[in-house]
Image: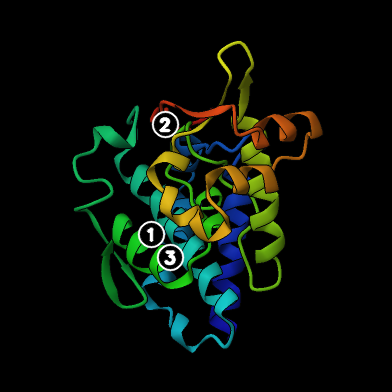
Amino acid sequence: SKASAVWRARRAGLLSTYATEDGGFRYAALLANAGDQATLRQVVEAVANASPVAYPERSAQLAFYINAYNILTVSAVVERFPIDSVMSVPGFFDTITHTVAGNPRTLNALENDIIRAQFSEPRIHFAVNCASLGCPWLDRTPFTAENLDASLTRLTRQFVGQSTSVDSRRRRVVVSQIFEWFAGDFQAAGGVRAFLVAHTEHEATRAQVADERMRIAYTPYDWALNARP
């Protein structure tokens, strides 16, 4: 529809202006621009009034919900800025509610009850962004039905490549804590190790990740805010 095309363009404009190439977000810069703050409010309102159930393709529905999660997270940080971490905001994920397609939802409910429960797509963990340094990078391009599959693969490979390291001396592969928290989501893909192997681009690293004698260890999650100047 015309309305959804307008809000898609506005959301894309905000991301291209304020999301940085290294996955962060320029919250202070957005706060300094009254016009773009108004645009952000319009995008949040569009999320509230959308009807994703009417979208013909499931990929369009999933793209909507990931975009909604990411922009609502940005909006929630902007409203409370300056903060050093979303974890310093009581109930950031589990009590503060946002309207999504006419229903009040917390960010946790949006992620767990809709994105994870209804779509069974493990790659979403590398597309939803929780405004923290430990997160996969916030992508500068909104998701669409057309780009969703390629974007999920690209972002997954990027994150696995950046966050996986091999500690040969201690015979372990060190990966993001995301794989520990959501281990069950990767079962359908053969489990965490198989998923990592499938999304590791560097050949030598892939062979070490595949080696069952290398145990999998997890990096503590960095909850510092992904703010950029």
The amino acid marked with disc number 3 is Ile
Quarter of image, res 118: bottom left
Dot 2: few (<14), some (14–19), or many (≥20) neighbours within 10 Å? many
In the depicted structure, whether residue 148 falls above or below residue 101: above
In the depicted structure, whether residue 50 falls above or below residue 185: below
Q: Secondary structure at mark 2?
A: loop
Quarter of image, res 68: bottom left
Residue shown at the point (19%, 53%) measured from the top left: 95
In the depicted structure, whether residue 214 falls above or below residue 103: above
For marks 2 and 1, the one nearer the N-term is: 1
For marks 3 and 2, the one nearer the N-term is: 3
Q: Secondary structure at mark 1?
A: helix
Question: Most extreme residue toward the front, as rendered?
Answer: 213
Q: CA distance from mark 1 to mark 3?
A: 5 Å
Q: CA distance from mark 2 to mark 1?
A: 19 Å
Residue 162, how many percent across, how many down?
A: 64, 31
Q: How is the image coloured?
A: rainbow
Dot 3: few (<14), some (14–19), or many (≥20) neighbours within 10 Å? many
In the depicted structure, whether residue 204 falls above or below residue 194: above
Residue 36, how many percent across, how many down?
A: 50, 52
Quarter of the image with the N terminus is: bottom right
Residue shown at the point (62%, 39%) measured from the top left: 159
The answer to whether the residue labelled 1 contacts the one labelled 3, judged by CB atoms less than 8 Å apart, is yes
The amino acid marked with disc number 1 is Glu
Residue shown at the point (51%, 61%) measured from the top left: 67
Using the image as rendered, state which of residue 13 and residue 217 is in the foreground: 217
- Residue position marked by numbered label 2 in the rendering: 225
Question: Most extreme residue toward the right, as rendered?
Answer: 203
Q: Secondary structure at mark 3?
A: helix
Q: Nearer the viewer, mark 2 or mark 1?
A: 1
Q: Which mark is residue 115?
A: 3
Q: CA distance from mark 3 to mark 2?
A: 23 Å
